[in-house]
């Protein structure tokens, strides 16, 4: 005979789900860095335009020296590290939500890009990367002849 642990039924199912960290995790990605994870993942937006890709990465609190970009076989890799440099002596923390550590994000862009034209700027905590498309990857208009 198997023994099963008794768990009293809670009357408030919603409260039980709120207390479960895993239930709301997919919906609560509003913070810039994903807490409770070895890899901190900053939020990013990727937009494709007719002649380029635009990538915005939320990276508040980072310095230019803490961000590294690389391109290999059409895959853009964004690496960074948020360092905890503050002195915590004589402080009693009641809540800590900011995360510190390294992160790596990769974006597969394919082979139709111009690696020499990539530009990256960092302003107000947002890394903005522009990756131009190569001439052969740009959409072309074809005229239809009647006749």
Image (cartoon, rainbow, N blue to C red):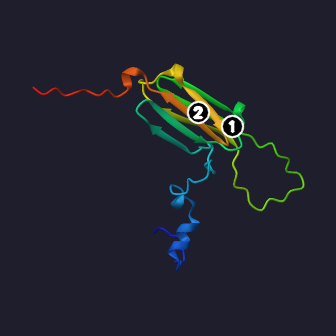
Residue ID for mark 1: 81
Figure quadrant of the N terminus: bottom left
- Tell me the number on the disc at residue 35: none
Q: Is residue 17 above or below residue 25?
A: below
Residues 86 and 23: in front is 86
In the rendering, at what x and y percent does residue 105 appear? 56, 37
Q: In this view, does 56 lie to the left or right of 73?
A: right
Q: How many labels does the image show?
A: 2
Farthest residue in the left direction? 147
Q: Mark 1 packing: few (<14 Cα in 10 Å), some, or many (20+)?
A: some
Q: Position of residue 124 (x, y in %)?
A: 67, 42
Marks 2 and 1: in contact by CB < 8 Å?
A: no
Q: Quadrant of residue 81?
A: top right
Which of the two residues, 4 or 32, is positioned nearer the viewer here? 32
Q: Position of residue 129 (x, y in %)?
A: 56, 33
Q: Quick one: SS at disc 1?
A: strand
Q: Residue at the location (53% across, 19% down)?
A: 116
Residue beneath the point at 58% across and 54% down: 30
Outermost residue, bottom direction?
11
Residue 39 position by quadrant: top right
Q: Which secondary structure, mark 2?
A: strand
Mark 2, Cα crowd under 10 Å, few <14 / some 14-19 / many 20+, is some
Q: Residue furthest front?
A: 146
Q: Looking at this view, name the residue that lies furthest to the right.
A: 90
Question: Which residue is drawn at the image coordinates 47% and 33% (left, top)?
Answer: 53
Residue at 68% of width from left, 44% of height from top?
A: 60
Q: Position of residue 84 (x, y in %)?
A: 77, 43
Residue 62 in the figure: left or right of residue 55 = right
| Quadrant, the C terminus | top left
Gap between marks 1 and 2, in whole Å?
10 Å
Q: In which quarter of the image is residue 25?
A: bottom right
Q: Residue 78 carries which label?
A: 2
């Amino acid at each position: 005979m198997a023994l099963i642990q008794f768990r009293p039924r809670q009357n408030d199912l919603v409260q039980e789900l709120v207390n479960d960290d895993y239930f709301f995790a997919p919906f609560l990605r509003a913070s810039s860095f994903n807490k409770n994870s070895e890899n901190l993942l900053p939020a990013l937006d990727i937009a494709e335009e007719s002649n380029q890709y635009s990538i915005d990465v939320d990276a508040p609190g980072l310095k230019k020296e803490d961000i590294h970009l690389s391109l290999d076989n059409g895959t853009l890799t964004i690496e960074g590290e948020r360092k905890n440099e503050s002195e915590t002596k004589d402080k009693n923390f009641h809540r800590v939500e900011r995360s510190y550590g390294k992160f790596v994000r990769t974006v597969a862009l394919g082979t139709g890009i111009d690696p020499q034209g990539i530009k990256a700027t960092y302003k107000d905590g947002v890394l903005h990367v522009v990756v131009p498309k190569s001439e052969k990857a740009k959409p072309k208009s074809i005229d239809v002849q009647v006749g």
